Image (cartoon, rainbow, N blue to C red):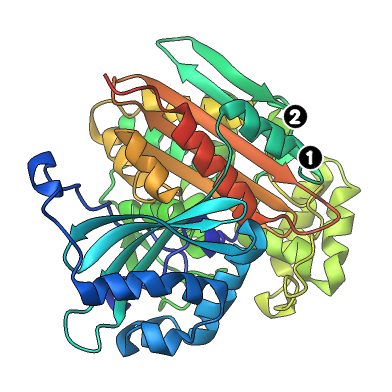
Amino acid sequence: MRLSILLSLLLTAPAAAQTVPSPAPPSAPPPAAAAATIVLDPAAARRVAELPGLLAGTADPAGLLSPEFLAAVPAEQVRALTAQLREAGGAVTGVERVTPRSPWSASVEIGYEKGVAAMDVVVAQAAPNPIGGLRIKGLLPRVGSLAEVEGALAALPGTTGLTLVRLGEGTSSPVLARNADRAFAIGSEFKLVILAELVRAVAAGERRWDDKVVLDGTPLPGGLFATAAKGTAVSLRDLAGRMIAVSDNSATDILLKTLGRERVEAMLPVVGIARPAGMRPFLTTLEAFKLKGVEGGALGRRYAASGEKERRALLAGPVGAAPISAIDGDMFKANKPIQIESAEWFATPADMARIMDWLRRHTESGPAAEARAILGKNPGVGGAAERWSYVGYKGGSEPGVMAMTFLLRAKDGGWWALSGSWNDPAAAVDEVRFAGLMARAVELAAPAAP
């Protein structure tokens, strides 16, 4: 439901700053003939050499980062984010690699005890030459094979699942499977099913991407449209784009209401959910928040003890009647799991791989093909995406829940799906660690370029 900023950890100049960023396309590498002639300006090289201090927490952000940067990403937030990286990766060990992109920019790898952080750095040309752009693309753990990734996931507390599938015409071949058929709480990954129903409707000519939804003033959860005025018109394209790329909960609930809960539920077996009951009734994000956050989770406990028919009556009655103001705004403040074994959406890693395969097969041509661009707006793994010609992605997280699923097209034209989940009802999961392992899996799974 809330996508952690750490899925695509991003510190940027003001023009690109977002709470849940959609990473910009990586800079194209310089031509081979010119690469050897690019060197960093000495002032830029000095700033790069100072990065370990910033990441280790020993250097003042105000001494390295530009005022414009700090206006968008305050020093306190920089310290918090770098502290989370250290918690996941251990102590900073130093600069391991610098690849200049221009005299004032470079791709840099900073070593940690347990991994390597890849980042893009831009240094201002005017004295005192502060860092004006710092994009941390991910912390990749020091694992050298998919088997090691699987082993690292197995060692995590709680329960983890992982599958890597080679997709084909009418068939698929699992290459890696760990608890691939075990159901997990998946957080915002449920939004892929809503996208699938929209793809079906667009392909059938029932809807168009440009169709407008006029907001009726119905209360909405957090997101761009939560404070939009009644009468605001927004296209299905924009709703779907925000739902997938930045996991906008308000866009999600508008789209689910527009398409219809029943139609989305009907898509569950169609897209490959082996046990559709795990997502029925198909909750809105606002309903999930009410179940978890009204009267200390009292509605959620009633929901957990009920059958499907009673759950639907509960949603139509007490849950629907509860105002947003009744939700405890601090329910996630303690960073502890809340009813993740009941008030959630449930699917297996194999289910999620099948959803991505369904989306792949139904977006090859025609108007529905636009969904591929939507899926590819936020690849979720930073630099690891460069190993593939296309990366579609959706993830989800909340305390105790983390899930990441990828649709991958290799540079040889082959298609793959990768999905991982981690649930721990006893404690918050280490999102940086999991995201790093999944990014490493994306990187390691890429076939050698032809």
Query: Residue beneath label 2, please?
Result: 182
Nearer-the-camera pick, 288 or 414: 414
Q: Position of residue 78 (x, y in %)?
A: 50, 78
Location of the N terminus (image quadrant): bottom right
142 relative to 24 in the view: left or right: right
343 relative to 18 in the view: left or right: right
Nearer-the-camera pick, 260 or 148: 148
The circle drawn on residue 289 is none
| Residue at 27%, 75% in the rendered image | 15
| Residue at 85%, 71% in the rendered image | 296
Location of the C terminus (image quadrant): top left
Secondary structure, mark 1, is strand
Q: Position of residue 102 (x, y in %)?
A: 16, 61
142 relative to 445 in the view: left or right: right
Q: Residues within 10 Å of mark 1 (few under 14, many from 20)?
A: some
Q: Are marks 2 and 1 in contact (CB under 8 Å)?
A: yes
Question: Residue 371, relative to residue 115: is it above or below?
Answer: above
Q: Residue furthest right?
A: 305
Picture quadrant of residue 301? bottom right
Which amino acid type is marked by label 2? Arg
Picture quadrant of residue 268? top right
Is residue 200 at least partly visible in the picture? yes
Nearer-the-camera pick, 6 or 277: 6
Question: Residue 184, relative to residue 95: is it above or below?
Answer: above
Q: Residue furthest left?
A: 33
Question: Residue 170, relative to residue 273: is it above or below?
Answer: above
Secondary structure, mark 2, is loop
Is residue 267 at least partly visible in the picture? no
Q: Position of residue 34 (x, y in %)?
A: 9, 47
Which is more N-terminal, label 1 or label 2? 1
The circle drawn on residue 159 is 1
